[in-house]
Amino acid sequence: MRGLESSVSSSGYLNEFQGWTHKFIFPPYEFSIANALITNFHMPKSTLLMMVSAFAGYDFMMEAYNEAVKEKYRFYSYGDAMLIL
């Protein structure tokens, strides 16, 4: 996600990009390219959870995480995933 967002021009087009990104995505952030995200359930207070919260909204993500805990979803890299539209 950071790589895609780093490749967006000021006019909103996706350009070829080579190199490192220093983009740190956290709420509030307005995404330029992505309109969907497939992701795992990340650890609390992690930068990945911050990025997902920027995409879907903090309150929505906390509801999803509460439901995941209640339903015993598996967390972290090899756990369950979700599609956020």
Image (cartoon, rainbow, N blue to C red):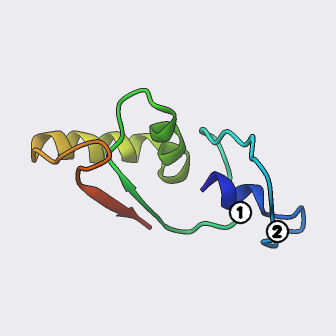
Between marks 1 and 2, how big is the CA–CA gap? Answer: 7 Å
Image: 4 above or below 72: below
Rendered residue at 66%/46% (across/down):
29
Quadrant in which the N terminus appears:
bottom right
Q: Residue 81: x, y in percent?
A: 29, 57
Which comes sooner in the sequence, label 1 or label 2?
2
Q: Quadrant of residue 65?
A: top left
In front of the other: 32 or 1: 1
> Which amino acid, by three-letter code, is at mark 2?
Gly
In the picture, measured across the screen, residue 82 lies left or right of residue 51, that is left
Residue 85's tag is none
Q: Is residue 18 above or below residue 22?
A: below
Viewer can see residue 39: yes
**Percent x, y for residue 45?**
43, 26
Please state which amino acid type lies under the numbered disc 1.
Answer: Ser
SS at mark 2?
Answer: loop
Label placed on residue 32: 1
Q: Which residue shows up at 67% across the image and 39% down it?
A: 24
Left or right: where does residue 28 sit relative to residue 40? right
Q: Do tag 1 and tag 2 residues touch (Cβ < 8 Å)?
A: yes
Toward the left, the furthest residue is 71
17 or 59: which is nearer to us? 17
Image side of residue 1 versus residue 48, left or right: right
Q: Which residue is mark 2?
A: 12
